[in-house]
Image: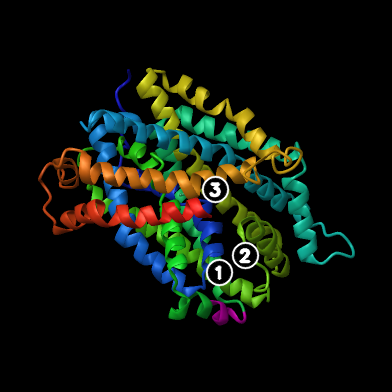
């Protein structure tokens, strides 16, 4: 088997990991959750969740990944836990592969909207329709039109394949080094534009001025779920990426940096969306997932000058976020096939991505022609979404904490966090305490609430 690759530089390693974390979760799920859960109060709890639980659990995943130097299954096998724990890695690989099925479809939608923004056809209004009706119809027609979105889904799969085949250092790392700064630059431009809109301050107040009476246990659980989703925890992704970390990488510090950057993307999105929505009086619209991105935002762009420019920039941002996340999700399976079955990189990439031409097609068609096939009352796409994000993701994170806190060799976490005893920090003991006692209880609550939903 080829030698395990490593990220070449500290910046590249952070760019790639942030690329995985920053995705549709930050750009559309975060504003939607913030709106549904009462605004600033949710933001506050969210920030607490990121630091009190997100950073420790991320440090734990990094520790397991670097100690194991293998795929998600090998990470458990190689760290000397009792035998059956490898199944937790298997569960994570399965879950991340399921995510890929539908995430690839959404990546395709973002590409289509990027092309339609550049070409301008997104803004060819039909007479007699309001802008809201126009974009809702467009979204409905596009997403459920059967074969049409497939071309873009296939394109997204092709882009992933091309990047992944080139490899960890030359593909994932080099691309992230270019795309992540671009993503932050576009975000900052939007932030500047949105904050200078008339009436922006009302939106800011909703986002930044907490009403503590809005904090309920449900709001807190939603914030925790969102933090885990956004940081890509519990899916084997960080275990896989950290198996490419060099031995000098400071894991806890890296976890803080990645979490901070991920949080800042979500925060910037809040600073962009809420002022713009208030300024154009669209606050009555529910900022739910797809509607926010494919209806509300185009409505805002159509009311601004340079509509196509803003629209193209935004969907470029979204496409970048989607692609850098999908490559990280796919890498979990690629690493698994390479490490478990000794496949070459190319074969592993093909074996991971080619079946998606079928699986993602099924997911895509389940929004239209195949919508009559349901699982627990949901179409295939939505069923996979809630199975993975509400159930498998918290379950993976929960079992990981139980393993590292209670079953793995005691020294593993301390040894990895301290780089073999060369860094001394009280913070490491705090992380260990949280992983052992606090995280399992809180994640279990999220898991149970996900089961009930
Ligand atoms: N963290 C990514 C986002 O915010 C999504 C993701 C979740 C990726 C879970 C992998 C696993 O969009």
| Callout 1: SS | helix
The residue at which mark 2 appears reads as: 287
Q: Identify the residue at image location x=89%, y=62%.
A: 127
Towards the viewer: 406 or 53 = 406
User: Disc 3 or 2, which lies upstream in sequence?
Assistant: 2
Q: Residue 187 location in percent, x, y?
A: 51, 61
Measuring 63% from the left and 58% from the top, which residue is drawn there? 293
Q: Which of the two labelled residues, at mark 1 and mark 3, occupies the earlier sequence position?
A: 1
Residues tagged 3 and 2 counted as in contact (Cβ below 8 A): no
Label disc, if present, on residue 35 of the rendered structure = 1
Establish if 36 lies above or below 149.
below
Magenta-drawn stretch contains 201: yes
Q: Given contact means CB atoms under 8 Å apart, are the residues at marks 1 and 2 in contact? A: yes
Q: Which residues are magenta?
A: 198-203
Vertical arrangement, residue 347 with respect to residue 117, above or below? above
- Asked whether the viewer can see residue 69, the reply is no
| Most common SS among magenta residues | helix
Q: Residue at x 52, y 37 (%)?
A: 98
What residue is pinned by disc 3?
Answer: 386
Establish if 378 lies above or below 240: below
Quarter of the figure with residue 55: bottom left
x, y percent for residue 64? 26, 39
Dot 3 alpha-carbon crowd within 10 angstroms: few under 14, some 14 to 19, many 20 or more: some
| 268 displayed left or right of 294 | left
């Amino acid at each position: 088997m080829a030698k395990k690759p490593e990220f070449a530089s500290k910046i590249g390693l952070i760019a790639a990991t942030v690329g995985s974390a920053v995705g549709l979760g930050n750009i559309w799920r975060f504003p939607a959750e913030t709106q549904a859960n009462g605004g600033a109060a949710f933001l506050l709890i969210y920030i607490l969740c990121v630091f009190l639980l997100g950073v420790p659990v991320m440090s734990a995943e990094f520790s397991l990944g670097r100690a194991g130097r293998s795929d998600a299954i090998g990470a458990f096998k190689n760290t000397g836990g009792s035998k059956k724990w490898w199944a937790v890695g298997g569960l994570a690989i399965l879950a991340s592969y399921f995510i890929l099925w539908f995430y690839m479809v959404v990546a395709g939608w973002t590409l289509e909207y990027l092309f339609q923004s550049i070409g301008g056809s997104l803004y060819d209004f039909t007479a007699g329709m309001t802008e809201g009706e126009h974009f809702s119809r467009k979204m409905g027609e596009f997403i459920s039109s059967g074969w049409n979105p497939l071309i873009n889904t296939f394109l997204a799969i092709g882009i992933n394949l091309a990047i992944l085949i080139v490899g960890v250092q030359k593909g994932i790392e080099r691309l992230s080094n270019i795309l992540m700064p671009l993503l932050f630059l576009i975000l900052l431009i939007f932030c500047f534009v949105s904050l200078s809109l008339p009436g922006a301050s009302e939106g800011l107040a909703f986002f930044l001025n907490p009403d503590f009476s809005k904090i309920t246990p449900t709001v807190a659980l939603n914030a925790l779920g969102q933090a885990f989703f956004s940081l890509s925890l519990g899916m084997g992704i960080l275990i896989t990426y950290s198996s490419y970390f060099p031995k000098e990488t400071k894991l806890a510090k890296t976890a803080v940096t990645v979490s901070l950057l991920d949080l800042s993307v979500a925060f910037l999105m809040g600073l962009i969306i809420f002022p713009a929505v208030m300024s154009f009086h669209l606050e009555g619209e529910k900022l739910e997932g797809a509607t926010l991105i494919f209806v509300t935002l185009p409505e805002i762009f159509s009311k601004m000058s340079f509509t196509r420019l803003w629209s193209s920039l935004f969907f470029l941002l979204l496409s970048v976020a989607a692609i850098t996340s999908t490559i990280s999700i796919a890498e979990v399976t690629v690493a698994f096939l390479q490490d478990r079955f000794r496949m070459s990189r190319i074969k592993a990439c093909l074996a991971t991505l080619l079946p998606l031409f079928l699986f993602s097609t099924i997911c895509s068609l389940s929004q239209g022609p195949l919508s009559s096939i349901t699982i627990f009352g949901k179409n295939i796409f939505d069923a996979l979404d809630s199975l993975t994000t509400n159930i498998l993701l918290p379950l993976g994170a929960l079992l990981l904490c139980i393993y590292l806190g209670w079953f793995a060799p005691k020294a593993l976490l301390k040894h990895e966090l301290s780089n073999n005893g060369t860094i001394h920090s009280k913070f490491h003991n705090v992380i260990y305490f949280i992983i052992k006692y606090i995280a399992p209880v809180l994640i279990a609550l999220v898991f149970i609430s996900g089961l009930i939903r």
